[in-house]
């Protein structure tokens, strides 16, 4: 009888403790200016920067796929913060904000696209291309976003001196124009 009581008590304790797992707050984000990206970084003048792909506002509702209302609100707020930081010229802070939103919604295609556009603006063309490819894969059924991703990929490849690959990317973008 004592064994059963001990077993039941321990099972109850484990069940009660398991409900707290996964409910902790997200880890804080710290900015480290010494941290370097592996993609090539090209310094651009302000005139050249203005010609680059800008952070595009895409006014689409965040899909409620397995997300709690608090998470959706958090993502929307982080998107608004990133947009504000971008408009104020705080590009790196905007990128960190988008990365934080991606930790909450790691399969959200628009977040990857916006981060790719920011990295393109910073001159990190290889990273921008890779982020746009990921966004294109995640943008199932969103043909306008797929087209924008391929155009961004083409621009990044052009900046990297890959004219033939840029043309192929533009051809892929044309596929989505008809749809």
Image: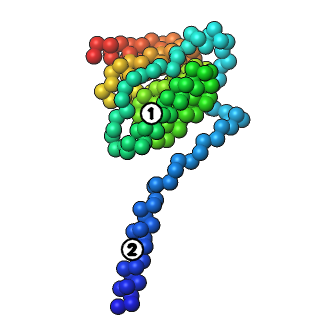
Number of marks in picture: 2
Q: Position of residue 88 (x, y in %)?
A: 61, 21
Which corner quadrant of the image does residue 137 belong to?
top left
Query: Regarding mark 1 in the picture, which secondary structure is present there?
Result: helix
Q: Is residue 13 above or below residue 166?
A: below
Q: Is residue 2 above or below residue 114?
A: below
- Residue identifier under label 2: 12
Q: Residue at x 58, y 11 (%)?
A: 50
Q: Position of residue 35 (x, y in %)?
A: 68, 36
Q: Residue at x 35, y 85 (%)?
A: 4
Q: Position of residue 134 (x, y in %)?
A: 44, 31
Which corner quadrant of the image does residue 65 belong to?
top left
Observer-nearest residue: 172 or 176? 176
From mark 2 to mark 1, how far is it between C-alphas? Answer: 38 Å
- Residue identifier under label 1: 76
Q: Residue at x 39, y 81 (%)?
A: 7
Residue 77 seen in the current view: yes
Residue 165 seen in the current view: no
Of discs 2 and 1, which sits in the foreground?
A: 1
- Residue located farthest toward the right when viewing the structure as drawn: 34
Q: Is residue 1 above or below residue 90?
A: below
Q: Residue at x 39, y 75 (%)?
A: 11
Q: Earlier in the sequence, mark 2 or mark 1?
A: 2
Q: Position of residue 30 (x, y in %)?
A: 64, 41
Crowding around mark 2 (Cα neighbors within 10 Å: few <14, some 14 to 19, many 20+) is few
Q: Determine whether, in the image, residue 62 is placed left or right of residue 116.
A: left
Locate the N terminus by quadrant. bottom left
Locate the C terminus by quadrant. top left
Q: Determine whether, in the image, residue 85 is placed left or right of residue 65.
A: right
């Amino acid at each position: 009888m004592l064994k059963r009581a001990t077993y039941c008590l321990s099972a109850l304790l484990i069940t009660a403790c398991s409900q707290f797992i996964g409910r902790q707050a997200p880890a804080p984000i710290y900015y480290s200016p010494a941290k370097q990206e592996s993609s090539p970084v090209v310094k651009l003048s302000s005139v050249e920067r203005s010609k680059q792909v800008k952070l595009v506002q895409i006014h689409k509702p965040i899909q409620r796929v397995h997300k709690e209302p608090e998470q959706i609100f958090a993502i929307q707020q982080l998107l608004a913060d990133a947009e504000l930081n971008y408009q104020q010229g705080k590009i790196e802070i905007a990128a960190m904000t988008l990365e934080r939103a991606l930790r909450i919604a790691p399969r959200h295609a628009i977040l990857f696209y916006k981060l790719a556009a920011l990295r393109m603006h910073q001159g990190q063309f290889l990273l921008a291309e890779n982020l746009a490819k990921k966004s294109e894969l995640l943008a199932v059924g969103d043909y306008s976003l797929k087209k924008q991703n391929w155009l961004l990929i083409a621009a990044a490849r052009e900046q990297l001196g890959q004219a033939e690959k840029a043309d192929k990317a533009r051809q892929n973008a044309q596929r989505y124009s008809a749809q």
